[in-house]
Image (cartoon, rainbow, N blue to C red):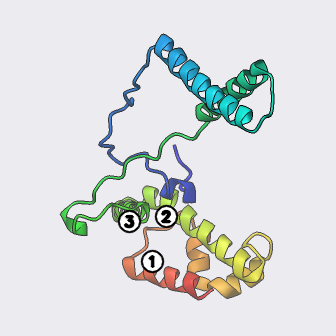
Amino acid sequence: MSDGGLDDLFTFGDEPVDEPAEPVVKRRSTGLWILRNALLIAAATAVTVAALRAANTHVSLLLIIAFFTGLRLVLFAVAQVAPPPAPKRRSAGAGNGGHQADSLRATVRRWERSLGRAHSDPDLYARNVLPALAELSDERLRLRHGITRASDPRRARELLGDPLWAALHDRGRRTAKASELEAYVTVLERL
């Protein structure tokens, strides 16, 4: 069960996913991988030895081979800890003119669905909408005025106004009307 915070608003847990559950991993033969790397090291060694001999410089062949083997192992280790590739973006469809969907639009749609369901379910409103409003209120107060509702309740009440303050502190309250929510958002934007 979620607590209705901002993290819930930005998660994509209930969004349908068009991609397969497990990505297909192409396995290569170990022998072929070793042969490919050995040929790569041999070619790099040959070029390096030729360049050093052309410059009339002598370096141990084992040192050159060890250098390129170590370099190849470092590159292999780096490839193993590389971040996974970014997920493919889904197209938004006809509503977006065929452009790629963006996460902000998906998040706003999720908020709209959550608010739509909250109008008919007071428990959902108290669980999801009020905590999100409270978190947004505290964040705006902290960013703009250096306080939170808990640290300076008197000043926070003055800044938020009585309607929003009452909505945030009366948990047994009915669901808010659309006009009340708009008024709350306006107060938060003014902060």
Say which residue appears at 50% left-offset and 80% top-offset.
Answer: 185
Say which residue appears at 59% left-offset and 38% top-offset.
Answer: 82
Residue at image mark 3:
105
Decide if residue 180 is on the left or right side of residue 130: left
Of tags 2 and 3, the one toward the viewer is 3
Q: Residue 98's spot in the image, x, y percent?
A: 23, 64
Of tags 1 and 3, the one toward the viewer is 3
Residue at image mark 2:
129
Q: Residue 50's spot in the image, x, y percent?
A: 66, 31
Report how far apart the C-alphas of labels 2 and 3 lie in the structure: 19 Å
User: 122 or 95: which is nearer to us?
Assistant: 95
Q: Residue 96's spot in the image, x, y percent?
A: 25, 68
Decide if residue 100 is on the left or right side of residue 184: left
Earlier-in-chain disc, 1 versus 3: 3
Indicate whether 190 appears above or below 137.
below
User: 173 or 144: which is nearer to us?
Assistant: 144
Earlier-in-chain disc, 2 versus 3: 3
Q: Is residue 158 visible?
A: yes
Using the image, tell me which numbered label, if any, was put on residue 181: 1
Callout 3 amino acid: Arg
List the single residue furthest toward the top. Answer: 31
Decide if residue 139 is on the left or right side of residue 36: right
Neighbour tally class for label 2: few under 14, some 14-19, many 20 plus, Cα within 10 Å: many
Say which residue appears at 78% left-offset and 35% top-offset.
Answer: 56
Indicate whether 157 appears above or below 43.
below
User: 42 or 169: which is nearer to us?
Assistant: 42
Q: Helix or strand or loop: what does disc 1 sit on?
A: helix
Q: Is residue 5 visible?
A: no
Indicate whether 22 appears above or below 151.
above
| Tag 1–tag 2 contact (CB < 8 Å) | yes
